[in-house]
Amino acid sequence: MLPQAFLQRVRQQLGPEYEEFLASYDLPRAVGLRLNPLKWKGQTLPFSMEPVAWAEYGFRYEPGQRPGLHPWHEAGLYYLQEPSAMAPAELLDPQPGERILDLCAAPGGKSTQIAGKMGGTGLLVCNEYSPKRAKVLSQNIERMGISNAVVLNETVERLAARFPGWFDRIMVDAPCSGEGMFRKEAAALEDWSPENVELCARRQAGILDAAARMLAPGGRMVYSTCTFAPEEDELTVAAFLGRNPEFSIAQVAAPWFAPGSKEAPGTFRLWPHKLRGEGHYAAVLVKNQGHEEEPALCKGEKLPRQLTDFMKELGLKLPEGKAVAFGDTWYWAPVQCPELKGLKVLRPGLELGQCRANRFQPAHALALWSGVTGPVQELTLDEAYLYQAGETLPASQRGWLLACLGGVPLGWAKGADGMLKNHYPKGLRRRNG
């Protein structure tokens, strides 16, 4: 049962469209996935799909097909994402080589979409305040084979003090009351109240103001929510513009979406009765003036011999970047990675592996990174399921190998005595065939 206070307000918002909106709750919800351009090389997915008009690489699929169980999902060939949720990152229009911040990034749908458009270049900083959600975010960055991302678990205030006027683009997919997810998530419906809407609006104001400080002059920021509440959408944007006169709403063509209300013309609403997706709101903001500052960049370190020997033996070539060590674990950080000392860091770049005594243990992230080449053992679909369940398989050759399905790396394995020792992480193993 939808809350009466919610229904009364939506009736006022939609007028004659209200009954059509209400009827949309009786329809099957749209489900989608987004191909990962960092990995997808033309493989044909075994699902019936149709393109999402507003999202490059976005597709809807039939709910009964369950692509989350296919080995390619865990290998990061695609990301399961509701179609409307693909819109904000498209509106952000990320470009290769830029410095981009996803401020409220978990679980990682928009971060991984942005990373795909950056093509492994530039710097993507993904932040999440909740430690539990930040861990999930870090796992999805790894799964999608992203090498140019730094994952943080920080407050927006600490980041604003550290990176004033530094980012070319910022995504603010703000925590909200979740009205647009009522059909998808029962928890959003259970937690809703007019008081929570007001609480979210106050929180969003603080997040937006912090983001404004971090955007470089001429930069673009997208503010998005998955709610219909004007207090969290147009009114929040209008109040932000009043506090930050150096910003304006960008005039962006998006013919698939309904216009926002008169309080913030030029913004967008995604209504479930107008498109096959859940409810969202988005505003594209530009910073017309301000000051840009350059924080110190982190210094690279010399890679240990064990690691360089491993890379040479397998013929692996890393992208432009610099080595960073956290204990005995080595990462390959983006060239523009800032100094991270004093920040809560989950992932300072691509995890390479651990150096212990005279040997190197490669990280799962290194296997999933799309740029990896080297000795490969191509698996059948049945073998891929067994591999991801931790089973031992026959080996085609000796030494470290990439277990692959259709040219997509699933993880590491090591051939010896005709058998393939399985190095798929124990925490990820599951019987999903």
Image: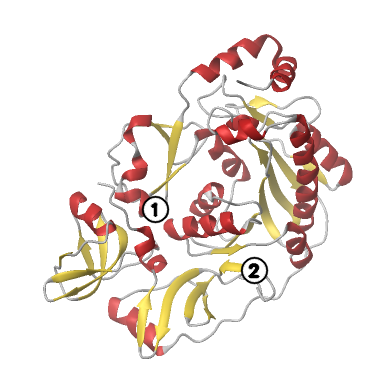
Quick check: can you spot residue 280? no
Q: Quadrant of the N terminus?
A: top right
For the residue marked with disc 1, what is the amino acid?
Gly
- In this rendering, position of residue 236 left or right of residue 33: right
Residue 425 falls in which quadrant of the image? bottom left
Residue 69 falls in which quadrant of the image? top left
For the residue marked with disc 2, what is the amino acid?
Lys
- In this rendering, position of residue 398 left or right of residue 86: left
Label 1: how many Cα within 10 Å (few below 14, some 14–19, many 20+): many
Q: Is residue 15 above or below residue 64?
A: above
Q: Nearer the viewer, residue 307 or 343?
A: 343
Could you tell me which residue is drawn at 32 percent across and 50 percent down? Answer: 72
Q: Is residue 183 above or below residue 286?
A: above
Q: Is residue 46 above or below residue 263?
A: below
Sequence-wise first label, 2 or 1: 1
- Residue extending furthest left? 418
As measured in the structure, the alpha-carbon distance from the residue carrying label 2 to the one carrying label 1 is 25 Å
Quick check: can you spot residue 207? yes
Q: Nearer the viewer, residue 182 or 208?
A: 182
Contact (CB < 8 A) between labels 2 and 1?
no
Q: Position of residue 222 (x, y in %)?
A: 68, 44
Q: Position of residue 29 (x, y in %)?
A: 48, 26
Location of mark 2 (residue): 344
Could you tell me which residue is drawn at 76 percent across and 48 percent down? Answer: 208
Q: Position of residue 112 (x, y in %)?
A: 51, 52
Q: Is residue 217 above or below residue 349?
A: above
Q: Position of residue 318 (x, y in %)?
A: 42, 72
Q: What's the image's color scheme? A: secondary structure
Location of mark 1 (residue): 76
For numbered disc 2, what is the local secondary structure? loop
Could you tell me which residue is drawn at 19 percent across and 64 percent down? Answer: 392
